Amino acid sequence: QVQLVESGGGSVQAGGSLRLSCAASGYTYSSNCMGWFRQAPGKEREGVAAIYTGGGSTYYADSVKGRFTISQDNAKNMAYLQMNSLKPEDTAMYYCAADVGGVSPPPFNLLVPDEYNYWGQGTQVTVSS
């Protein structure tokens, strides 16, 4: 059974940084891609960043480009989200997700939640002004 466990969330002031980690385990097949998503109260879950596990290509939502960086350590089955220059509007529950098995989603679908079949429980990020 695939399990994803996020860590690294917390409370910071605007302009600060946080690094989220996602530990993956239980893979029978290699993941196609890993993604970070977030959901604020009363809002839909939105894709923040994603990375193809094999090639390492990365994709970002416009709202975080230049501030967030997704990375991975395939040897450790880890994914990371470095978040810099945080803003109050970044406040949300952040989720790690993996697409395992089947065909890799195309780049234009990498930030679509329905493309992912495994999810972590989330880690809260709160940014105060």
Image (tube, rainbow, N blue to C red):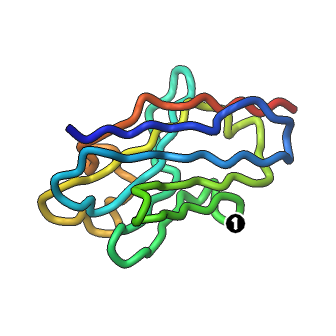
Please provide percent x and percent y for residue 57.
44, 75
Count every numbered label the image shows and give the total: 1
Q: What residue is rendered at 53% in x and 62% in y? A: 60
* Quarter the C terminus occupies: top right
Residue 49 is situated, as x and y percent measured from the top left of the image, at 50, 57
On the rendered structure, is 82 left or right of 55? right
Quarter where residue 13 is shown: top right
Q: Residue furthest top?
A: 42
Instruction: Check the image and report above or below for 124 versus 16.
Output: above
* Residue at x-position 55% and y-position 47%: 21
**Which residue: 47% across, 64% down?**
73
Q: Quadrant of residue 5?
A: top left
Residue sitting farthest toward the bottom:
55
Q: Nearer the viewer, residue 2 or 61?
A: 2
Position in image of residue 103 (x %, y %): 15, 64
Where residue 96 appears, as percent x and y from the top left, is: 44, 43
Q: Does 106 sit above or below residue 76?
A: below
Q: Nearer the viewer, residue 32 or 3?
A: 3
Which amino acid type is marked by label 1? Gly
Which residue in the protein does label 1 denote? Answer: 66
Label 1: which secondary element = loop
Q: Is residue 67 left or right of residue 38?
A: right
Q: As drawn, is 55 to the left or to the right of 62?
A: left
